[in-house]
Amino acid sequence: MIIYLSELVYKRHDNSMLSNYMLDLIPGQFLLGTGIGFMMALAADVALFDVPAEGQNNASGIITTGETLGSSLGTAIIGIILILGVMGCISTAVDNYATDYSGDEQFHQEVYD
């Protein structure tokens, strides 16, 4: 995480719109993760509050199954959106920019060094 953040700060000196946009997202993502972490820590306690002692094992298992299923489905949906977005953007970027930089040696060294 520290390496990722330091890389974003390093890229901030580059005047690209993407690195500036990513740095603007970090505080909101931190708050979102903190809020969800606090909420999920208390969710099992609240759900098991009225369950009798002999049924808490089953209820806890159902809660864990629901959390795991929700995480898996969320990851799959975000992955599909990401893949579709990347596929569309890559083809657009190649069509627009590859012909401009294909013979540029300085661009080639910046990309591969």
Image (tube, rainbow, N blue to C red):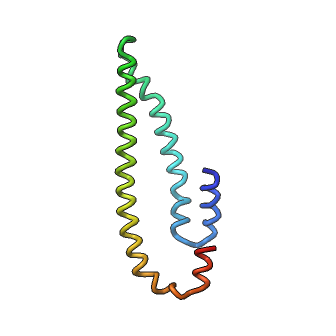
Front residue of this view, candidates 60 and 46 = 60
Which quarter of the figure has residue 110? bottom right
Which residue is rendered at x = 36% and y = 22% of the image? 59
Residue 100 placement (x, y as % from top left): 48, 86
2 and 21: which one is in front?
Answer: 2
Residue 98, compared with residue 50, is above or below; it is below
Q: Count all numbered tags in the image, as a single digit.
A: 0
Coordinates of residue 111 in the picture (x, y in percent): 58, 75
The quarter of the picture where the C terminus appears is bottom right
Residue visible at 39% across and 54% down in the picture? 79
Location of residue 92 in the rendering, given as x and y in whole percent from the top left corner: 38, 75
Q: Nearer the viewer, residue 95 or 38?
A: 95
Q: Position of residue 72 (x, y in %)?
A: 38, 43
On screen, residue 37 above or below 58: below
Seen as rendered, the residue at the extreme bottom is 103
Seen at 50% across and 85% down, the residue is 102
Place residue 6 in its image quadrant. bottom right
